[in-house]
Image: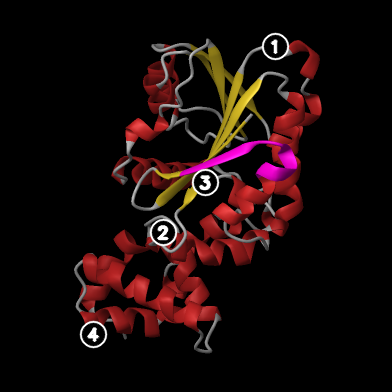
Amino acid sequence: MLDIVIKDKMVEILSEYRLLGALIYLNRIKSKTVYRESVRKEVIKILRDRGLTEKRAVIFIDEIGQIISWAKYSLIDALNFTEENNNISSDLFQKIYRRRMEEQFYFMDWRKQEFCFNITENTQVIDVGAGSGYFGPMLMGMNPFFEAYHSIDLYPLSENMKIEIENMGKVYYDNCSVQEFFKDFDENTNNVPTVVFMAEFLHCFNTDQRWDILENCRKKFKKLISIVIVEPKVGSSLDILFGYHMMLHTGGARITEKMMNAYGRKLYMNLDCKNVSDFHSMYILSI
């Protein structure tokens, strides 16, 4: 049986963004591999940071099957990303998911100056996979020439974010998938210089889908200035915990500088890379 100290930490720990998925991965992959051991070490470190001793952290992982059974309520996060459960979009899931993303956003020590893109003409920013819109205020605040913020996501902006962004410029939103957005998009009506922003979004798609999204951005936004992509920094702890997500949900690979260079060449765009937090890289594809 798990001791009371571990149980006291369980809800707090299992609600952390993507940690449950890493634990599920450890439970599935029993054989020792270099990748599995790196995930295991990172999870132990997180558990230690949350107050468990080394011994109890190891017990936590070794008894993970029991923990997962006890914590079934949290599996809605994983279920939402599986194809056969694609219709799971309950208010409960949205509250859990949005809370995690917002907590991660505010917890990160973002290097805000890196979100200034040196735009010198009036333009709009299109935030693809915007979620609650948590990057909106920073994008608008750091770029005074952004006249409008356009959100694309399956779910609407939070009211708080919408109000905050409206104090800086116009707000537009399409509550649909990115594929639906491009399907219905009339490129002849869009003559606004555009920056496309995607944060922790592109990894959700396989290789072919990623290319389709980027190619559509290049072709359909006639006055495209740049495509800005923020993803977990390769080799960081967040990146290690993202590994399970790639394998279980997309069948794709991590977003890397080499990958973005290849996309840039195919799109006839130049690539610039920078770190925007200790855990995130920014890839900027520019005309």
Element at label 3: loop
Give the residue at mark 2.
238
Q: Earlier in the sequence, mark 3 or mark 2?
A: 3
Q: Circles 1 and 3: CB distance less than 8 Å?
A: no
Badge nearest the viewer, 2 or 4:
2
Crowd tier of the residue under label 3, counting other residues whose Cα lies within 10 Å: few below 14, some 14–19, many 20 or above: some
* Near-viewer residue (217 or 258): 258
Q: Earlier in the sequence, mark 1 or mark 4?
A: 4
Crowd tier of the residue under label 1, counting other residues whose Cα lies within 10 Å: few below 14, some 14–19, many 20 or above: few
- Mark 3: which amino acid? Glu
Element at label 4: helix
Marks 3 and 2 sit apart, C-alpha to C-alpha, by 11 Å
- Mark 1: which amino acid? Asn
Q: Earlier in the sequence, mark 1 or mark 3?
A: 1
Q: Earlier in the sequence, mark 1 or mark 2?
A: 1
* Near-viewer residue (214 or 23): 214
Q: Earlier in the sequence, mark 3 or mark 4?
A: 4
Q: Circles 2 and 4: CB distance less than 8 Å?
A: no
Give the residue at mark 3.
200
Give the residue at mark 4.
55
- Mark 2: which amino acid? Leu
Give the residue at mark 1.
191
Crowd tier of the residue under label 4, counting other residues whose Cα lies within 10 Å: few below 14, some 14–19, many 20 or above: few
Quadrant including the N terminus: bottom left
Q: Which range of residues does the magenta coloring cover?
A: 264-273
Please identify the quarter of the rendering in which residue 220 is found.
top right
